[in-house]
Amino acid sequence: MGWSVLSLLLLGPAVANAASWRNNKVDHHGNATENFSSSGLKLYVTAPRLRFAKNDEVAFHASLVNEGAYPVTIYLHENPLKNFTIIARDAEGRSLNVKEEMYFQGSKDYRDPHHTRYSGEMYPMRKLILHAGEKYEKRIRLADYVDWDSFSEKVRDLNVTAHFYPNPVQAERYFLASSSSLNLIYDQTREVPKERDNVGDASTETLRVSAREIVYLMLSAEYTRDWSQYFKYVSLRDIVRDYPEFMRLYAQDSTELQTKALAEFRKYLSGRGYHKLIRFRVLAGESRETSDTAQVRVRARRDVEGFEREYLTTYYLTKRDALWQITGVESRLAD
């Protein structure tokens, strides 16, 4: 009996502690007193480029990665200066001035749906849960976080690190230091020339392509056997009427026969029995163009079953959706 009582006395505190541990509501998402780094939350700074000219926007990425086993909660303030502190040091180790939070030019309306209500009050933060293996990445523009205007002209090499505050309102003293750093080159002696605006590109007028240009593009596509481009300029349903052997089949009332006729006609135009184009010349003086219709004449040399022949061809075009489309063809041997 005495032994059992002694056992209970000895084991009592351990049992009590175990029960207390089981009943304790451990918040694996993160709380105000948690050491976030021990939860596996890591901060990295990365950049797709490390060299910047004087007129470049110096920017990089800050990435929060949950490398632990449990979810971690962070609170993103609508003022990013409360979440991130960027430390930029020159070649001599001197830090550039960090911008004060009050200078952030952001939304003054805390009712932004991007943020949430907390404890029934307006709360300017958004709760974000990072599960194991997940990452939150933010683009950092250096000029938003440090006093860019006070840069010395001698500043060239910058070492950049970052601090992140996972809960800047309830736990201001807890922060993560970045596990990596960046060595940026800010070359103030060089400027990248900006791209000039092309006034023509900004025009609201519809691009105008002449009927002669359409014929030239069509024949160029035929010459290079680029049939995907060739059939953009040709209306098969219209020009099939100028080819009696296919028109007889297409003239039938049967939709199936019409579809078959157009398929065979397409094969014919793209090389089956078609005359191989050797060279061509669009005749400028013999072209006619009105608002809706046009005629373009072409002199072309073709290989027909091993014999070269010269053809004079008239292409008829119709304006459709502001562009010309070939809707008719007449061809004869040239004199």
Image (cartoon, rainbow, N blue to C red):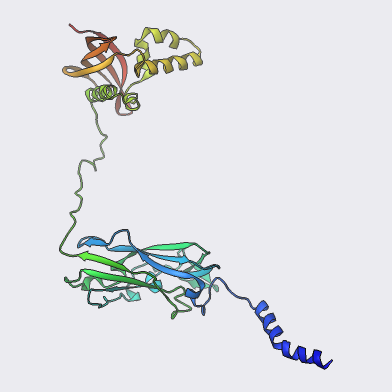
* Residue that appears at 27% across and 10% down: 306
* Quadrant into which the C terminus falls: top left
Q: Nearer the viewer, residue 184 or 298?
A: 184
Instruction: Name the quadrant containing residue 222.
Output: top left
Q: Position of residue 83 (x, y in %)?
A: 41, 72
- Quarter of the image holding residue 180? bottom left
Counting from the top left corner in percent of width and height, residue 139 is at: 36, 62
Is residue 331 placed above or below 99 in the rendered structure?
A: above
Residue beneath the point at 65% across and 79% down: 21
**Direction from residue 69 to residue 205 in the image, left or right:** left
User: Which residue is at a point 20% across and 53% down the rendered structure image?
Assistant: 194
Given the current orientation, which residue lies at the most extreme front position?
3
Is 3 situated left or right of 333 in this image?
right
Instruction: Describe residue 182's horizontal placement relative to residue 285 as left or right.
Output: right
Location of residue 254 in the rendering, given as x and y in whole percent from the top left corner = 51, 13
Q: Which of the image's four quarters has the N terminus?
A: bottom right
Q: Along the line of sight, which residue is nearer the eye, 249 or 177?
A: 177
